[in-house]
Every structure is written in structure tokens, then in C-alpha cells.
């Protein structure tokens, strides 16, 4: 497996922050690194697999990758990413970073931000991309200040259902709802009514954002959560099927294999 090291990306041993902008990001094999990373999606879609668990990337999606996490990119489609790499111990922070960076001991490490927040975030990243590639004391100081501004914007720009105003934010709120309520019997008509979007428009925009139809995405999210249970619990496959929203374990196995390319039993035994 590829091991990415700080000296391959950071200008010097004194550097704390750097950026790697991908426009577009290509498929990239599994790797890990000796630094932390924040990934912000500005366009397109694809699959990001972290520690064997797939995540669907789409516009305004943010993901935190810890040191030693294994991850890869696949099935990318015009995917534009901003990768912000950082060495936490090198940062001379003026704010407590842990207040704004996600918890890595089982807490959420991915979220969506609003369109307005995304606009501010990408302006900060443009400046950070410039400063972090200049090896001077002033630029290192500016990079650290910009990084702190960035993580605060990412934290307070998180979308909640009640403030999804633009069409893009409304579609994103639907994606978030599916991510959280995948166990329920969902259909796109009810979700469109809830988000106050025409079903036809939501169907089109949902596919545009995720690269998947609504039904495909729902099975993808259920399979993703089933993978976590298969890896981290002793629940039977039947109970896992019920736990992720299926009433029939055979149907669950069929859909799981369509998404993951393995039967649940094979996935568990090979992990």
C-alpha cells in the first residue's frame, strides 16, 4: 500500500499546512499518510472509501481523514477536490483546534456545508494555496491563520435541514436526510414534498449531485452502514438486514452484492 509522507508535500520540516488541489481528481489507489487531511468537494461526484467503508462524494461535501486512515478514490466523475494537509503538532494555534475539528474516536468525520459557506471556504483555500507554497516565515504564519479561519468556516457552515434555502442546499439536505434516516421506508416523492421541490426536479438534481439514482443511493447508504456492522459487531446477517432498513434478508443480500460486489457473508469472512 502507498504511504504518503510529509516530506513529499510540505515545503520544509517547519511547515504545518499545505494544499493539493485536484481539478479533476482521478481514481487513486488505497493509501495512507503521516499527516491529517481535510477534503472539500467543489464539483462532480465519486466514491471515497475510508478504512473499507465507502462514502459518496458530491458538491459541498467535507471529509476529515486522520493519520493512518486507509482511503482511496474510485468511480470519479468530473470530481474537483481541495485537499488541505496539516501537521497538527506544528500549528501555532490561536484557537483550540479540537473545538472545530471532528472527533476521530467514533464521531462524525464528514458533513455538508451551505452554498454561502462554500463560497467563503473556496476564497480562503485560494489564498491558502498561494501562501502555503511560499517558504518564508511570513507565509507560514499566514497559512496557519488562514487554516484556522478555514476550519471555523467549515464548522459553522454545516447544513442543518431548517436553513437549507437554495436549490443546491435543499438537494443536499435531502441527501443528508437519507444518510440519517436510511432505515426508514423512504421514497423520493415524500422527500420532494418535505424539501418543497418538484419530484422531477429533485430526481434530476439528486442524480446530478450524487451520480446515482435515488434508489441506488439508498441501497448504497444501507450497504455502507451494513459494512460497519459486519466489521464491528456479532449481529447475524438477518438482524443486520433489519437494522439497516430491509424486511427480507435475502433481498438485503442481493442489494448488498450489487453495491459491494460481495455477499454479506463473504465480506465478513474476508475482513
Image: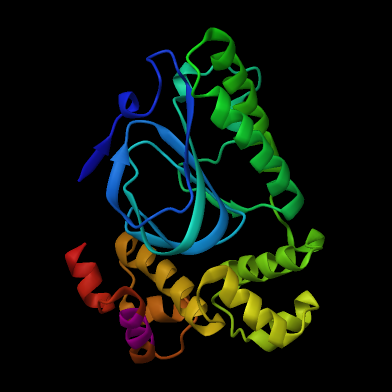
Residue 32 screen position, x and y as percent: 30, 41
Relative image position of residue 198 (x, y in whole percent): 76, 84
Taking depth in this image into account, of 233 and 219 the one nearest to the observer is 219
**In-image side of 256 versus 271 (left or right):** right
- Nearest the camera: 181 or 44? 44
The quarter of the picture where the C terminus appears is: bottom left
Q: Residue at x 73, y 58 (%)?
A: 160
Q: Is residue 92 visible?
A: no
Q: Is residue 255 magenta?
A: yes
Q: Would you say residue 177 sits in the magenta stretch?
A: no
* Residue 245 position (above or below residue 162): below
Q: Is residue 50 above or below residue 253?
A: above
Q: Is residue 174 left or right of residue 49?
A: right
Against 24, residue 196 (above or below) is: below
Q: Could you say where residue 246 lies in the image, as x and y percent from the top left?
A: 46, 85
* Res 112 quadrant in image: bottom right
Residue 263 lies left or right of residue 85; in this view the side is left
Question: Would you place residue 113 above or below residue 83 in this image?
Answer: below
Determine the residue positioned at 46% across, 89% down: 247
> Can residue 28 be spotted in the picture?
yes
Q: Which sits in the foreground, 113 or 97?
A: 113
Question: Which x, y percent locates residue 54?
Answer: 40, 62
Residue 195 image-quadrant placement? bottom right
Which residues make up the magenta segment?
252-258
| Relative to 124, 23 lies left or right | left
Identified at 32% across, 67% down, the residue is: 230
Depth check: 160 or 117 in front? 117
| Magenta span: chief secondary structure | helix
The residue lying at 49 percent from left, 58 percent from top is: 79
Which residue lies most toward the top here?
A: 137
Amino acid at each position: 500500500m502507498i504511504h504518503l509522507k510529509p516530506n513529499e508535500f510540505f515545503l520544509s520540516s517547519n511547515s504545518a499546512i499545505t494544499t493539493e488541489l485536484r481539478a479533476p481528481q482521478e481514481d487513486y489507489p488505497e493509501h495512507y499518510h503521516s499527516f491529517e487531511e481535510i477534503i472539500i468537494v467543489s464539483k462532480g461526484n465519486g466514491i471515497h472509501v475510508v478504512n473499507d467503508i465507502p462514502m459518496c462524494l458530491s458538491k459541498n461535501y467535507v471529509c476529515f481523514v486522520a493519520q493512518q486512515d486507509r482511503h482511496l478514490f474510485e468511480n470519479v466523475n468530473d470530481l474537483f477536490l481541495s485537499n488541505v494537509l496539516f501537521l497538527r503538532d506544528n500549528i501555532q494555534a490561536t484557537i483550540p483546534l479540537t473545538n472545530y475539528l471532528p472527533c476521530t474516536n467514533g464521531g462524525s468525520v464528514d458533513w455538508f456545508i451551505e452554498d454561502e459557506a462554500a463560497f467563503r471556504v473556496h476564497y480562503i483555500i485560494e489564498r491558502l494555496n498561494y501562501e502555503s507554497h511560499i517558504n518564508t516565515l511570513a507565509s507560514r504564519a499566514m497559512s496557519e491563520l488562514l487554516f484556522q479561519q478555514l476550519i471555523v468556516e467549515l464548522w459553522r457552515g454545516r447544513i442543518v435541514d431548517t436553513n437549507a434555502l437554495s436549490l443546491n442546499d435543499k438537494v443536499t439536505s435531502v441527501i443528508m436526510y437519507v444518510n440519517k434516516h436510511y432505515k426508514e421506508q423512504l421514497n423520493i416523492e415524500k422527500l420532494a414534498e418535505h424539501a418543497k421541490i418538484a419530484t422531477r426536479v429533485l430526481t434530476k438534481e439528486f442524480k446530478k449531485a450524487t451520480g446515482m439514482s435515488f434508489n441506488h443511493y439508498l441501497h448504497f447508504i444501507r450497504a455502507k452502514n451494513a459494512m460497519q456492522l459486519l466489521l464491528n459487531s456479532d449481529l447475524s446477517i438477518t438482524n443486520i438486514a433489519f437494522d439497516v432498513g430491509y424486511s427480507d434478508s435475502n433481498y438485503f443480500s442481493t442489494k448488498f452484492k450489487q453495491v459491494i460486489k460481495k455477499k454479506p457473508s463473504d465480506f465478513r469472512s474476508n475482513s
